[in-house]
Image (cartoon, rainbow, N blue to C red):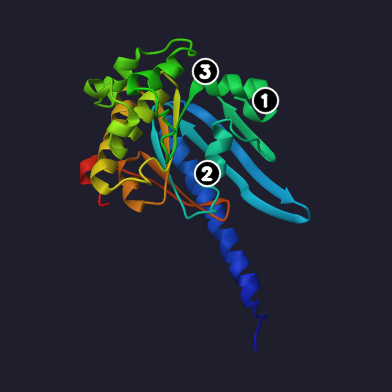
Amino acid sequence: MCGTQIPDEDTANLERHQDSVFALRYVRRMDKAAASDSEPIFRIDGLTKIYRSGEVEVRALNGVTLNLYESEMTVLLGPSGSGKSTFLNIVGGLDKASGGTVLFKDLDLTRLSERQLTRYRRDHVGFVFQFYNLIPSLTAWENVALVTEVARHPMKPEDALEVVGLRERMTHFPAQLSGGEQQRVAIARAIAKRPEVLLCDEPTGALDSKTGILVLEALTRINEELGTTTAIITHNAGIQSIAHRVFSFMDGEISSAHVNDRRLEPADVSW
């Protein structure tokens, strides 16, 4: 036999390494293309997150590098455990990195104290989660007003509800609203403080396709009309077609990335 045969395990490791290098180079090429249209709002380099429990070590993120740009909509795809939620939590200041850097404009999130991260979240970031977390005893207007009372330059609650198409429902309690309407109230609450960044973790995960489309329409409107940088985590591959850019996560790394030359309207998404 000529040459040396590489064992199967080593071959797999080599292929994973080559895929990772290719993805990183592709991300950098996309960043150069995107830079001509807008400025990076996040510069993320070598982002690593390790969780330890006794002698067990779990590497949730393994050297993720990418930029996110002002006013763009990004979709992060991947199965459970791929690292996408950990990534979003660190970018949003809900968790701290084990290594690497995360720059929000000129602010290095990896060097901030807990108090400084709280201020960062309050002043710059809106969050939307799979479950709405509305207070049942408060109306839609009152749920949104909770945020406007502590924000620096907030919208009026009724104006935030207008953006998501719920101005006429602002006196209703959560129990009087459908799941999609409750999620749109949660979105109104997130944008009422006029955040520069909106981070959404499975915002349609608990919804059927009809109500999920209404939620995506609200997110698209916010991105386009308010210029809010928006990142959406989802396992629903169909949703990627509404984004400017798409990143797929696998085993704590970016496994692939692409630009949508033609974006679809939410109503045209194959659910």
**Secondary structure of residue under mark 1:** helix
Q: Are marks 1 and 2 in contact (CB under 8 Å)?
A: no
- Residue type at numbered disc 1: Glu
Residue 123, numbered circle: 3
Snapshot quadrant of residue 86: top right
Tag 2 residue: 85
Q: Residue furthest front?
A: 137
The answer to whether any part of residue 140 appears in the image is yes
Task: Give the answer, above or below, for where 95 lies relative to 84.
Answer: above
- Residue 157 position in % (x across, y down): 34, 16
Tell whether 217 sits left or right of 142: left
Q: Residue furthest top?
A: 153
Mark 1 crowdedness (10 Å alpha carbons): few <14, some 14-19, many ≥20: few
Tag 1 residue: 114
Most foreground residue, 1 or 243: 243
Q: Residue at x 58, y 30 (%)?
A: 93
- Residue 96 position in % (x across, y down): 65, 35
Q: CA distance from mark 3 to mark 1?
A: 14 Å
Q: Residue at x 48, y 13 (%)?
A: 151
- Residue type at numbered disc 3: Asp
Q: How many numbered circles are shown?
A: 3
Mark 3 crowdedness (10 Å alpha carbons): few <14, some 14-19, many ≥20: some
First reached walking from the N terminus: tag 3 or tag 2: 2
**Secondary structure of residue under mark 3:** helix
First reached walking from the N terminus: tag 3 or tag 1: 1
Task: Give the answer, above or below, for where 246 lies relative to 94.
Answer: below
The answer to whether any part of residue 105 appears in the image is no
